[in-house]
Image (cartoon, rainbow, N blue to C red):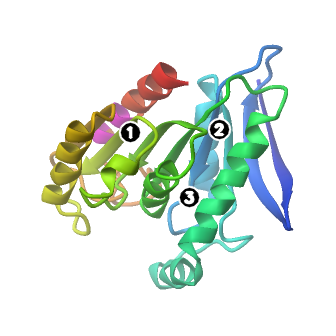
Amino acid sequence: MLLTEQVEYPDGQTLVGYLARPESVDPLPAVVVIQEWWGLNEHIRDVTRRLAGEGFVALAPDLYHGAVASEPDEARKLRMEMDMDEAVHEIRRAIDFLLVQPYVAGQTAGIIGFCMGGRLVLQTARVDEEVGAAVAFYGSPLAPEIVPELKAPLLGLYGAQDGGIVVESVRAMETALTRAGIAHEIQVYEGAGHAFFNDTRASYHSQAAADAWQRTLRWLRSYL
């Protein structure tokens, strides 16, 4: 049985997130789920519940503070109005909230994000020692000179036909990860485009999504 609820945690203002966890007497590892540019919509809530169903305590912070987009122009506007540094700060507060809960095990949390959220995964993993594992779905790759700043093992999942992310930039990040000695796995799926994991969009690629999900679970279980 899964327990789901809206949780609030203070940070000068009240931050809000969607929490899902198994009904368990034992503490479990924690994962923060970071939204696409659409906001904290039903797809992200579903991913949060799916992680809970796999034995994690999962929290999706509402980085748009109640706003959810259904059209690209609306999503683009919300994304442009969002301060990325502030979003990283709010993600870190979500991690802090999780790690003091009695139902959470360990001293680090995983982070997983999609599109804009994938970019935020990479940015958060540069600055937060409490990130134990990072999973970025089609997040804008880090420039090679920034890669050594990463503080967590990284799983990067990309589509070869992504019109917004050049595969060469993904490979450049991969090379830099190897040179920096950072544990990583980079998977580029042929035939898949951007947002291949989102099963509510025409971009969904079932084969790539299924494989990426299994890689994600293995990665989180290996490092948390």
Q: What's the residue type where badge 1 is placed?
A: Leu
- How far is the residue under mark 1 from the one under mark 3? 18 Å
- State which mark lies toward you, 2 or 1: 1
Q: Is residue 117 among what the camera can see?
A: yes
Determine the residue positioned at 26% across, 58% down. Answer: 145
- State which mark lies toward you, 2 or 3: 3
Q: Which mark is residue 35?
A: 3
Q: Nearer the viewer, residue 96 or 167?
A: 96
Report the magenta stretch's main SS. helix
Q: Is residue 189 among what the camera can see?
A: no
Q: Which residue is mark 1?
A: 154
Q: Is residue 152 left or right of residue 215?
A: right
Q: Is residue 140 magenta?
A: no
Look at the picture and state if 150 lies above or below 91: above
Q: Which residue is mark 2?
A: 49
Quadrant of the image containing the C terminus: top right
- State which mark lies toward you, 1 or 3: 1
Residue found at the very far top of the displayed protein: 26
Classify mark 2: residues with Cα within 10 Å, few (<14), some (14-19) or many (20+). Answer: many
Please provide percent x and percent y for residue 143. Answer: 27, 61
Q: What's the residue type where badge 2 is placed?
A: Arg
Q: Secondary structure at mark 2?
A: helix
Q: Which residues are magenta?
A: 207-212
Please provide percent x and percent y for residue 82. Answer: 59, 77
Look at the picture and state if 14 lies above or below 52: below
Classify mark 3: residues with Cα within 10 Å, few (<14), some (14-19) or many (20+). Answer: many
Q: Nearer the viewer, residue 178 or 50?
A: 178
Residue 203 lies in quadrant? bottom left
